[in-house]
Amino acid sequence: MSASSLIPTTEPRFSVPDRRGRFGKFGGLYVPETLMTPLLDLAAAYEQARKDPQFQRQFADMLRDYAGRPTGLYFAESLTRHLGGAKVYLKREDMLHTGAHKINNVVGQALLALRMGKKRIIAETGAGQHGTATAAVCARFGLKCVIYMGATDMERQALNVYRMRLMGAEVRGVEAGQRTLKEAVNEAMRDWVTNVRETHYILGTAYGAHPYPMMVRDFHRIISLESRQQIMAAEGRLPGHVVACVGGGSNAIGSFFEYLDEPAVKLVGVEAGGRGIRRGEHAARFAGGRLGVLQGCMTSILMDDEGQIEGTHSVSAGLDYAAVGPEHAYYRERGRIEFAYATDAECLEGFQLLSRTEGIIPALESSHAVAHGCKLAAAGRPGDVVMINLSGRGDKDVWSAARAMGEEIRL
């Protein structure tokens, strides 16, 4: 795969976003005036970088030599036999350096920050995988690194907190609100407003004000670029379904992008159903959300009649967010991407099933996609193909999963 193809300079037929950063009615720039200039500067810098062959080569080299691309497309033979239906393939983003897809975007944004002369990086993290990837890349490039993380998430992702600090990052706990991802984003944005001259904010998902949703999508497009070539080599045809978990939506839009113009390929995003679709008990924006503005863009948000953001819950720290990326809202409105949800119980079943049938322990975020993908495969025919994006590995989640299943790990 040539370096020049890693970041798209043309869009699929839906052609989004427009010059204002809008995906139809979704997206845009809803930020304080102090952030308008840095966001416009960032958009201009990215527009130049995405057309620069040297930037493309740097990005491709880092993905190959540092991140570990390409990742494999693995035929899950034992899982397929267990389900008794369609073939199941796993796109192995869990095999990347630092353990998840997040490093694709971090490498791209870090190179862009260096290009812009920024020496300090801030980021938010929920499950800790984006924070870990950011800490790693900042260590590689000698950049100062500050990570904001909700105190609740720090407790359930203590391993990743230690990994970030080991690589030289300062991890700042956030005690406000639910002490999870939404509050971490708030604190990161406050930091950026205060230190905008020397600081770049590596936002971790396909969310926020323009150009972040487009930029993060482009850096993760490599997932579907690879998987499309790999499934054609393995099966001689495209999959019937591509399934990915959706928090903000970065691994999902990266997994879906190259199939958007293929109507025969069903694209399915899986949200966090938590304890059930009741207020404050889940994070399934398309099962209980409404149109609104949060943290930089217009999209589907879990909020009440007065516009107050509702509480969320998920066994997985990375999907516990009240809003979804605007591009996902756009494609759902147009009927191109379907959305489902998996409950905590279903997620834990998927976590155990993949571990026991294939010896692959998935992240709890990815386990949502595994749970729903297995349903689709079980209902499918032997000739069908279901591709599941395994966005991250589950080492970080073993303690939390055990606790959620009523066990305590004792050393």
Image (tube, rainbow, N blue to C red):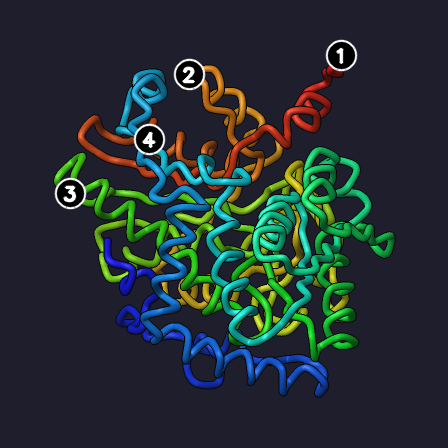
- The label nearer to you, 3 versus 1, is 1
> From this viewpoint, is residue 275 visible?
no
Q: CA distance from mark 1 to mark 2?
A: 26 Å
Mark number, residue 357: 2
Sequence-earlier tag: 2 or 4: 2
Q: Position of residue 81 (x, y in %)?
A: 30, 17
Nearer to us in this view, 326 or 6: 6
Q: Amino acid at mark 2?
A: Thr
* Residue density around tag 4, few if under 14, some if 14–19, many if 20 or more, within 10 Å: many
Mark number, residue 377: 4
Q: Amino acid at mark 1?
A: Leu
Q: Are marks 3 and 2 in contact (CB under 8 Å)?
A: no
Sequence-earlier tag: 3 or 4: 3
Sequence-earlier tag: 3 or 2: 3
> From this viewpoint, is residue 101 visible?
yes
Question: Is residue 219 found left or right of 351 in the rendered image?
Answer: left
Quadrant position of the C terminus in the picture: top right
Q: Is residue 121 above or below residue 349?
A: below
The quadrant in which residue 79 appears is: top left
